[in-house]
Amino acid sequence: MLSNRFLRTAVVFFVIGVGFGMYMGITKDFRFTHVHAHLNLLGWVALGLAGLIYSAYPQLEEGLWADAHYWLHTIGLVLFMGGFAYGIVSGTFAIVPVSLGASMVATGVVVFAINVIARIGQRPQPAGAMNAAHANSARS
């Protein structure tokens, strides 16, 4: 189930975000505050909540919307935060991965919003019901 992939990925981002927080606390080096906060909010919270929503409304997992949301959000967040972290370490702003990653996350959020708004009230189709409906219409 795609909802499980969202939840597992959220947990990975949570562990990484907490790791950054512990690193900052131990070393008293708080340069990675933005990375820590974004990994926890966009990674742990946003992907975790999306996973729970997809689990509660399985019809939202049908089609390409949810897959597009997952890949745009996940790859975008890695680029976005990787670019931020690189910029902090190198002292130069990594505009390409930061802007590309942020745009991908934002696009993923819009895809999620469209999917939820357009399909939240629909009931999931039983596996055999759609095939039977197509078979009946083909006979007509």
Image (cartoon, rainbow, N blue to C red):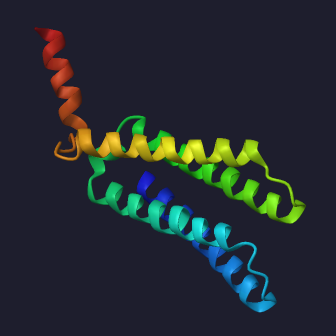
Q: Is residue 36 visible?
A: yes
Q: Residue at x 21, y 30 (%)?
A: 130
Q: Nearer the viewer, residue 26 or 132?
A: 26
Q: Is residue 65 above or below residue 29?
A: above
Percent across and percent down for residue 67 are 47, 42
Asked which quadrant contains residue 19, the reply is bottom right
The extreme right residue here reads 90
The residue under the point 10% across, 8% down is 140
- In the rendering, at what x and y percent does residue 34 appear? 65, 68
State the image coordinates of residue 139 (x, y, percent, origin top left).
14, 10
Q: Estimate the x, y position of residue 98 in percent, counting from the top left.
A: 69, 49
Residue at image position (81%, 58%) is 87
Task: Place residue 111 in its image quadrant.
Answer: top left
Q: Is residue 8 left or right of residue 97?
A: left
Rendered residue at 35%/45% (across/down): 113
Question: Nearest the camera: 47 or 97?
Answer: 97
In the image, residue 106 above or below residue 33: above
